[in-house]
Amino acid sequence: MHTDLVAALDIGGTKIAGALVDGHGHILIRAQRPTPAREDGDTVMRAVEEVLGELTVSPLWGRVTAVGIGSAGPVDASAGTVSPVNVPGWRGYPLVGRVRAAAGDLPVELIGDGVAITAAEHWQGAARGHDNALCMVVSTGVGGGLVLGGRLHPGPTGNAGHIGHISVDLDGDLCPCGSHGCVERIASGPNIARRALENGWRPGPDGDTSAAAVAAAARSGDPVALASFERAAQALAAGIAATATLVEIDIAVIGGGVGKAGDILFAPLRKALSTYATLSFVRNLTVAPAQMGTDAGLVGAAAAALAKRPDAAAAGV
Ligand SMILES: [Zn+2]
């Protein structure tokens, strides 16, 4: 029998997705449940077990050799626990042990969701072929992950590359994480919208005050909307430049809802990068939009599981 598949779990605050994935990143079987995020920890775990249950009854399950989990963070891969900000029932929750038990004692690999997206972009997306990359998700929050020396760099706890909570404004606004002036506090979708509203931007008749609505206003030339995206771009550029200076990345990939704003974000971002990334070894740094769609979390979790297999090098993961 072939043992060429892995199971992948993508656990977020709104949904728990699962899949069986082959060595090329193709999704063969899917399962999904809404995340009962306001319930107690064991209730949330039951939803994960239901997703796994749909996968384990598949005739393909016998070919599965490992399970990869990408979870909303913080995660602690060394302890096998997760404490997602948006799932209060899970604090130091022993997710890895519970998943291993539900998956028949297969090896389980846990990474943060930003790291999972990075694994997916490096394997099949915009960071493919780049040995040193930062991949970011800019949406409700700002997350990310690193590829260094051609390999995913999750760090000891699985959170490395969490660029959203690098401070780029020393005396800036208090961030929910407890620090000040974090990239996320300036560049996340809700903060782009908040800043536009504070400076006098008003939504259209539909009352939509999302970052996407601010992007639409910016596209039609609204100066306040444009300025809010420029400020977000500046914060992202400072964080990206700091990362590049520290570890010599050559590409920064940006996904998530805010990344979809296109040139409204990328044009000021490239301009700001030329201001902050000034030393010779970071001057050629490029930025690119993410290419992986909504399956990025699953594909990245699968990549992490595949990378742990003895034959990983042969599989090219
Ligand atoms: Zn923060």
Image (tube, helix red, strand yellow):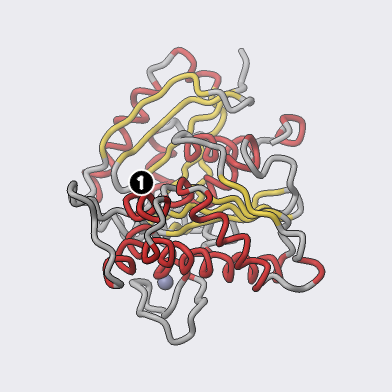
- Residue at 58% from the left image edge and 28% from the top image edge: 25
Quadrant in the rendering for residue 313: top right
- Residue at 62% from the left image edge and 64% from the top image edge: 271
Q: Is residue 266 left or right of residue 58?
A: right
x and y percentages locating residue 290 in the rendered image: 56, 43
Q: Quadrant of the N terminus?
A: top right
x and y percentages locating residue 277 in the rendered image: 69, 70
Vertical position of residue 221 compared to residue 182: above or below: above
Q: Which residue is mark 1?
A: 12
The one of 18 and 219 positioned closer to us in this rendering:
219
Quadrant in the rendering for residue 87: bottom left
Vertical position of residue 6 compared to residue 88: above or below: above
Vertical position of residue 207 compared to residue 53: above or below: below
x and y percentages locating residue 70 in the rendered image: 47, 45
Q: Is residue 183 left or right of residue 206?
A: right
Q: Amino acid at mark 1?
A: Gly
Quadrant in which ligand 1 is drawn: bottom left
Label 1 neighbour load within 10 Å: few <14, some 14-19, many 20+? many
- Residue at 49% from the left image edge and 54% from the top image edge: 264
- Residue at 76% from the left image edge and 30% from the top image edge: 314
Q: Residue furthest front?
A: 221
